Amino acid sequence: MRFVEQLPYATEVEDHVTIPMADGVRLSARIWRPVLPDGEPVPAVVEYIPYRKNDLTSTRDAIHHPYIAGHGYACVRVDLRGTGESEGVLLDEYLEQEQRDAEEVLAWVAAQPWCDGNTGMMGISWGAFAALQTAARRPPSLKAIVIASFTDNRYADDMHYLGGAMLSDNLAEAGTMFAYATCPPDPEVVGERWRDMWRERLEAARPWVLEWLRHPHRDSYWQHASLSEDYAQLQCPVLASSGWADGYSNAVTRLLAGVDVPRKGLIGPWSHKLPHLGEPGPAIGYLQEVVKWWDHWLKGIDNGVMDGPMLRTWMQESVPPSTSYEERPGRWVAEPSWPSPQIKEVVHPLRGATIVTDEEEPLPRGRTRTVQSPLSVGQFAGKWASYNAPPDLPYDQREEDGGSLVFETEPLTERVEILGSPSVDLEVSASAPVAQVTARISDVAPDGRATRVTYGVLNLTHRESDEHPEPLEPGRRYPARITLNGVAQAFPPGHRIRLSLSTSYWPLVWPAPEPALLTVHEDGAALTLPVRPTEEPDGMPQASFGEPEGCRPPPVTRLTEPEQAWNVSRSLVDYHSALDIVKDRGRQRYEDNGIEVGLRACERYTSVADDFASLSGRSAWTMTFSRPDWDVRVETSTVLTSSADTFTVDATLDGYEDGRRVFSRTWNETVPRNLA
């Protein structure tokens, strides 16, 4: 990244500004403003998240907020209620209270003498959710939003459920927020009342996974704050982005197709990162795009921001399997609208072990194939949403394919490019009332190495409805469609396209209550690929994005080294298998305020042989905050196990001051599975 030293305007910053809410709670904000000779008001851009502006996001914030402010905007970075130095408690994600607070924040900002009354919202992940959800409420000052790594459908593709099957990230994200929501405010900011504020957070805490487990179907809990319930709610322009390695890429194209407002979409090769910090690369000059967006929609500058294609995306080239990539080779392609008239849905029947590409080939009918996958299928699946640290992309799929039903093409005679969401249509019967099927598409090189391109999951009880799932009648045939995650991918000549079907994908997906034998009937079985004809023009110059740039963040001193691990282990004595993940940032000191912070997160997923009652997941966090006269620590642990009928959550929360435990609580609760 190129750090920009000279911007159109000098900036000034206020580190702790309180914003009053109607119920008396005050939220804490950091505000960057351009220094203007006559003090004229400017538009304001708000980022609204729970991740601690004073330390944990301060480096990232300092890269882009001063940059945007230096182009003539007031940037307001707000900690949600109950996080950082904001008062109150945070009880769950995306609650009505959170959105009311956001509306009040925007009204407060718009009324300040330094704001001209026009506001925008931006963010990644939670910040993008907040922007989209707030925009749907149509606050009068909000004129446009910029969102990255978001969803418009909280049940379809957030960290909780996929195709009606529970993701292990349901546990992992709950563990993350169990820790973040119980961290203390900074005494140097809020004064001596920090203990009372911290105690209030600790007392109110509860493992969020319990609530998420109680809603395994798409009910009103998930419909709340899901724009997909009514796309007409969004009335302001939106610049939406994500990455193909992220878990949220589907929302970009779905939003482009669903809303009727000025909109642009951008999908790169990135993991869960902002595009100017994008990994795998190439990262792009995203902040230049953002400033151009704000200039048009908040300042009224006619700069051509809406010219050109609706969607720009990175067409990925074939690569060997790896759990991380520094860069993904490929090229930028563009579509004038979405759905694109250039994309052709090409249907390939599945016969025997073959994906049929020769339409003149006679197709035998009536045959069946069966699969009952071992629990080991999925150990090389990587994360639902890659963060690229530790390396968390899927590895070589050959071992996974050994426990799967496999179909593949003959070696391709010409290049094939796909852009969009593939789908698999099946006629299936199962031996149990609850069963899953995971479909994976891989790029198979001539030497046999298999790189996963995309995947999809379906809890077969959700074959007709996520709102009203129904159990299977063992042995009865049912039609089912598995929609895979969208992707832009090229398959070179000489490679094969492989489709793999498995009945488990642990630990990325929590398995069904019991093993199930799945019978796939050839009649009606087909793979549909969204093919982008290779003779179509790319639709945009390859140098259309600038170099990544931003402001230089304040110094951070590393005090201990970070640690990253992603280890798969198996014992051939007792058949115990485990996936152990470590994400340790190390201890570091933020030199602008002297606070020292440590963050260590560990996840562990275990099973024994193919015993579905042996499944266990654990998310444990340790977060430390200190100065010479202040030393606190929060430790959380959440363990999830299951039987055929229930989920069990065992959780602990401990708070320490000066090495002495000052708070401790445990939870031991069960939740019915209810077709999960």
Image (cartoon, grey):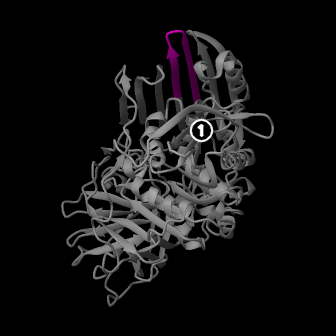
Residue 94 located left or right of residue 497: right
The residue lying toward the viewer, choosing from 98 and 487, is 98
Residue 675 located left or right of residue 249: right
Does residue 473 appear anywhere in the picture?
no
Q: Relative to residue 238, is residue 56 depicted above or below? A: above
Position of the N terminus by quadrant? top left
Does residue 113 appear anywhere in the picture?
yes
> Quarter of the image holding residue 646?
top right
The residue lying toward the viewer, choosing from 161 and 645, is 161
The residue lying toward the viewer, choosing from 235 and 337, is 235
Relative image position of residue 621 (x, y in whole percent): 52, 28
> Quarter of the image holding residue 550?
top left
The amino acid on which the numbered mark 1 sits, given as a three-letter code, is Pro
**Farthest residue, direction front:** 38
Relative image position of residue 470 (x, y in whole percent): 69, 63
Q: Secondary structure at mark 1?
A: loop
Relative image position of residue 325 (x, y in whole percent): 29, 49
Residue 484 located left or right of residue 415: right
The answer to if 272 sits in the magenta stretch is no
The residue lying toward the viewer, choosing from 594 and 551, is 551
Report crowding for label 1: few under 14, some 14 to 19, many 20 or more residues within 10 A (C-alpha): many
Region rendered in magenta: 621-638
**Farthest residue, direction bottom:** 360
Q: Relative to residue 522, is residue 125 depicted above or below? A: above
Look at mark 1 in the image and give the residue it sits on.
50
**Farthest residue, direction right:** 23
- Residue at the (70%, 51%) spot, across then down: 674
Relative image position of residue 477 (x, y in whole percent): 59, 72
